[in-house]
Image: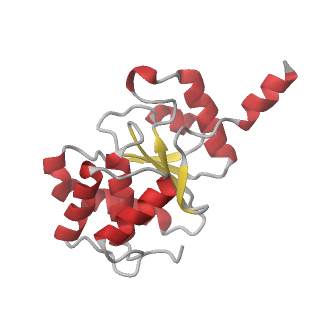
């Protein structure tokens, strides 16, 4: 039993977790899993891991308030900026990017960004954010970098988010942090 307690006390890395910027910005599916696969015990284990690993904030891209109360219980700051439907992206992406940038303005911040599941929408937002802060200049470069970091291909919906970022000329300039 003590082994189980010890293991639980360490927490569990969120499913599909990956670093976008080492020790600063990461992505994953929603802690606890998505939709019908969501499990409260798994969510608790993953939040324990996030807190123990030094995460300061969670940025939820969900339209619903799922998990927000749980972040608070584990001492994690959180923001929710609903990503919305694809036709809403020109209006929602600036708010997502600026919220994330403002969190990362704090040099001690460590932020996890999640959507319901680990998919194209999350990868597209993270690739678009790298363009927004000036870390990457072009869409294909941002997409390729995200594919390498996430170890999966960015599909059409993710590429559309990158394109919307470029089409909207969404840029913060040199970015709030030096990586």
Q: Residue visible at 50% across and 75% down?
A: 177
Query: Is residue 108 found left or right of 120 in the rendered image?
Result: right
* Colour scheme employed for the rendering of this structure: secondary structure
Percent position of residue 104, x then y: 49, 65
The one nearer the camera, 114 or 152, is 152
Residue displayed at 34% across by 80% down:
173
The location of residue 125, given as percent across then percent down, is 34, 56
Image-based side of 57 in relation to 102, left or right? right
Q: Position of residue 166 (x, y in %)?
A: 22, 70
Quadrant, the C terminus: bottom right
Q: Quadrant of the N terminus?
A: top right
Residue lying at 48% horizontally and 69% vertically, measured from the top left = 105
Residue closer to the observer: 86 or 50: 86
Q: Is residue 15 above or below residue 149?
A: above
Image point (35%, 53%), residue name: 154
Location of residue 156 in the rendering, given as x and y in whole percent from the top left corner: 24, 51
72 or 50, which is in the foreground?
A: 50
Count of all numbered marks drawn on residues in the image:
0
Q: Residue furthest left?
A: 87
Q: As drawn, is 67 to the left or to the right of 157?
A: right
Q: Residue furthest bottom?
A: 174
Against 141, is 66 above or below? above
């Amino acid at each position: 039993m003590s082994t189980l307690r010890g293991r639980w006390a360490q927490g569990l890395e969120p499913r599909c977790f990956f670093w976008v910027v080492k020790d600063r910005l990461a992505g994953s599916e929603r802690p606890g899993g998505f939709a019908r696969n969501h499990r409260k015990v798994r969510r608790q284990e993953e939040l324990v891991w996030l807190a123990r690993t030094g995460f300061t904030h969670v940025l939820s891209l969900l339209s619903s308030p799922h998990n927000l109360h749980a972040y608070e219980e584990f001492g994690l700051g959180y923001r929710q900026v609903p990503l919305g439907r694809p036709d809403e992206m020109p209006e929602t992406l600036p708010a997502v990017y600026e919220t994330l940038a403002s969190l990362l303005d704090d040099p001690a911040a460590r932020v996890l960004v999640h959507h319901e599941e680990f998919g194209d929408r999350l990868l597209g937002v993270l690739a678009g954010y790298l363009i927004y802060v000036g870390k990457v200049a072009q869409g294909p470069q941002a997409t390729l970098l995200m594919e390498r970091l996430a170890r999966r291909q960015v599909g059409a919906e993710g590429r559309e988010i990158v394109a919307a970022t470029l089409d909207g000329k969404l840029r913060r300039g040199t970015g709030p942090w030096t990586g």
